[in-house]
Amino acid sequence: MAVSETRHGRLWTWLDQRIGLADLEKLARKKQVPVHRHGLWYYFGGMTLFLFVVQVATGILLLLYYRPSAEEAYESIQFLMAEVEFGWLIRSIHAWSANLMILALFVHLFSALLLKAYRPPREVTWLSGMALLGVALAFGFTGYLLPWNELAYFATKVGTEITGAVPLVGRFLLRLLRGGDEVTGATLTRFYGIHVAVLPALVTLALGLHLYLVQKHGMSVPPGVEREGAPRFTPFVPNFLLRDVVGWLSAVAILAALAAFLPAELGKKADPFAPAPVGIKPEWYFMFMFQTLKYLPSHILGIEGEIVGVVGFGLGGVFLLLIPFLDRRAARGQPSPLFTWIGIALIVYVLVLTYLGYTASPTK
Amino acid sequence: MDQTLEGHTTRRGFVNWMLGTSAGAFLLSVLYPVGRYLVPPKVGESTAAAVTLAIKPDDVKPNSGQVFKFGSRPGILIRTPTGELRAFSAVCTHLNCTVQYRPDLSHIWCACHNGHFDLNGQNIVGPPPRPLDGFVVNTRGNQIVVSKSA
């Protein structure tokens, strides 16, 4: 006691006796990060988390002005962008940070995939990460509709109609999601509730589990590095954390620049009785799926093309989810080039289709 | 602890069974109303079998089209290059987007996934799996009346 008192002062000691600060300090000092040539990829999980914190903070600020109804949503954001001081900044940072967060999440996911970080005993870490991916995409999809503009309206119409293509329960799910048969103000209210209450609750659970497991198992060392012998380690506090902070501060600078030079647009108010606008597109991270649906013919082997597409993406998602249990060679610590190539093929597919989505003429 | 003792239910077994079923019944009584609450109530489908449009016949030039409100869903009124008025549901049969008339192609087109329909509403190119539903167009003097085909 006397030792810690001289080291940290009386307030620290008072708190330690009541909430156990020394245990936390021990935990922080215990955490080590391996150092090797693939170390760069360790930063993307923390980067995703940081951008998520930015989302929570800016999201709470947006709540103070946003009105979740078909009559008022668009107008409330117009007011926010034009009248409220720095309203444009808060909304633009929320929009850009969302995009960068998904980007960081994808980099984190694919680096974990290629470096085989899902090997035992980290299967549940992988599963909780996939749950977080699902939640993040749901955040993006529901948040996109909230401004109630033309692009968002039709993107939501298409996106929710796709759930209607799910065999057996599709129609039920579609009505549940839309709050009715069509995309209306009821859908907006529902998406709002999901965006600001349901998904944050789910994130808290999945993120809590994910972070706990990362602490429990420590950072995964890639099998290639492992085979060369045990790597060197560096303390998480302060060495790695300070490098993390450099990344986070850079992200803040990038966010500020993007928000200032490319502020979030609002577009035209949604009109359910206007034709879908030319060049309608979803958020970029759904683009590869959107573009795939464009290329599928109306019928494949007698089944409607969209059903083939939806079931295909569903199976792809399940495959990705189950990779820790399918990659038996990596689990035994042997090289598994097949799964490396599957990972690379996935990345190439997503990149090519996304590229085509932005370059192929929308009217041909 | 054994559930039965010489064929008799033990006191502990009975209490556990009561607790288990009560907990189950309690969960059901919570989950059922919540589940029903989440399913939106059925709103009566718009029964309008015919609508009189706010558009005058002369407003629709040959080789053009306009979207109108048919009950709660959009319809599209087109005048073919030969001068004939036709109307279809404007809801694309692929993924529900609202279609539009493309004068440069002289047919109906969906911007969402590049679906094409001819002047009879038939799906000709792209992902749409079925033709557009057709409506009947009647011109009464200076009014256009669109009705569901019988």
Image: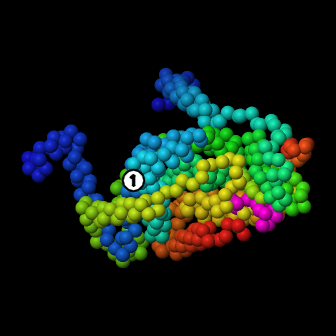
Q: Quadrant of the N terminus of chain A?
A: top left
Residue that appears at 74% across and 55% down:
B99
Q: Residue B60: give x, y in percent of width and height.
A: 82, 54
Q: Residues within 10 Å of mark 1 (few under 14, many from 20)?
A: some
Residue that appears at 23% across and 41% down:
A19
**A348 horizontally vs A129: left or right:** right
Q: Is residue A295 magenta?
A: no
Q: Residue furthest bottom?
A: A228
Residue beneath label 1, please? A54
Q: Is residue A287 visible?
A: yes
**B104 horizontally vs A142: left or right:** right
Q: In the depicted view, which residue is nearer to us: A303 or A188?
A: A188
Residue that appears at 28% across and 68% down:
A233
- Which region is colored magenta? B102-113
Q: Is residue B133 visible?
A: no
Task: Write down the chain letter for disc 1.
Answer: A
Residue that appears at 65% across and 71% down:
A360
Q: In the depicted view, which residue is nearer to us: A113 or B148?
A: B148
Vertical placement of residue A177 versus A337, above or below: above
Q: In the depicted view, which residue is nearer to us: A311 or A264?
A: A264
Q: Residue B70: give x, y in percent of width and height.
A: 78, 43
Q: Residue A41: give x, y in percent of width and height.
A: 40, 68
Vertical placement of residue A30 versus A164, above or below: below
| Badge 1 element | helix
Count of marks, rendered view: 1
Q: Is residue B108 magenta?
A: yes
Quadrant hosting residue A267: bottom right
Vertical placement of residue B6 versus A281, above or below: above
Q: Amino acid at mark 1?
A: Val
Q: Residue B56: give x, y in percent of width and height.
A: 82, 47
**A146 horizontally vs A302: left or right:** left
